[in-house]
Amino acid sequence: MKDKFSDCRLSIEWGRDKSLTLEWDILDHAVSFFWLKLFHSCLSEEISLNSRYVGFLQGPRDQDFVGNLLNECIDTINEDGRYFIEDRYEGEITQELLHEVHHHFSTLMGDEFSKSQFWIDSNTTIHSAICGLNDYIHELESWQSAVDVNEVDEEITSAYVTSRFFEAKGIEIQDDWNHLFSLDGQFGDLTLHYDQIGKTWLEVLLERDEVIIEDDIRPLSRLTGSFNINFFETDREYLLDTITPYALSKGIELEDSSLRLGHCCLGRLRESNMDREELISLLSKNLDISSITLMQNEEVIIRKEIPKSKERYFYSKNK
């Protein structure tokens, strides 16, 4: 079975006119093999794929645009009358706003295995608003990060794409795969998506999140066909220098591989004839995955046209 998914390449076309194509060489390790099986299954079964394009400063969505969408979700939940969120976007992105709203999301949602009673008793309009809390908080957070790094160096980006198959089947990540998670990352890396509810330890430590409850801190444990594409680099030594003081204050042992710090890389971006600045500029004008092709050597395993993503989504299952 493994031979079917060895020496694979992923090709993604961007924009409805398919004006940009990027390709990735899939890495040869256990996680990428199981990811390919799940990814292929999702495409074959035509499970809906929803992508979000985050931190692209030249893209069509700016801070106020996203902040207003967040407020619409808060208004929808408040108008329902069963739960009230006092926090709102008021033109400024603060860690307090990000942490508090994410906490509301976790409370209202429950988790992927046991939904909250509020969720169970809610209609799809409320479901969509709850999911919007999470989406827009992460989008605002990434926008601020992109602004911050751009002020240091205009050639640096923190943009990424997250592509999630709705309610796709998954498997548990095994402990002997922990070594595949790394704080080092290359520009364009294709990585596992955090396809569960909560925050990773790396997020909590970087943000110094004092609001989150311990049960909501969850290393990635579920492998699905979903994926992220990171258009930035990460450096292990820099990240460790940044998070170590706070980790020590919380008694967190960073050498513990079960924390699964960083990302699990599935594939490396193939070099193109554009430099990074040109690629990001063109990508920012085509933030729309229009087709996906999985190849083995030069043979097409599967190719799918991808419909335009919806603004928001909701889970259809209450269990």
Image (tube, helix red, strand yellow):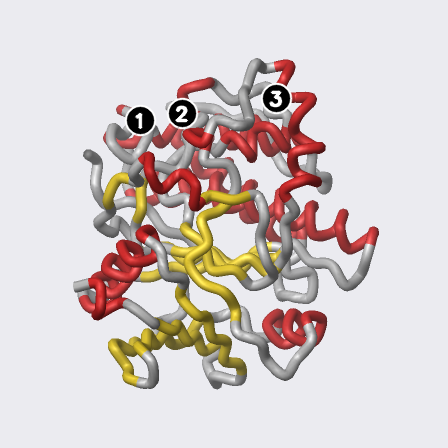
- What residue is shown with label 3? 247
Q: Quadrant of residue 231?
A: bottom right
What's the amino acid at mark 3?
Ala
Farthest residue, direction right: 152
The mark that comes first in sequence, 2 or 1, is 2
Three-letter amino acid code at the position of disc 2: Thr
Q: Is residue 295 above or below residue 204?
A: below
Mark 2–mark 3 Cα distance, whole angstroms, equals 25 Å
For the point 51% across and 32% down, the residue is 102
- Check contact, mark 2 vs mark 1: CB within 8 A: yes
Q: Which kind of residue does numbered mark 1 sit on?
A: Phe
Nearer to me, 170 or 136: 170
Query: From mark 2 to mark 1, how far is it between C-alphas?
Result: 9 Å
* Image height of 200 relative to 82, above or below: below
- The mark closer to the camera, 2 or 1, is 2
Residue at mark 2:
107
- Horizontal placement of 127 versus 207: left or right? left
Mark 2 residue element: helix
Q: Which mark is residue 118?
A: 1
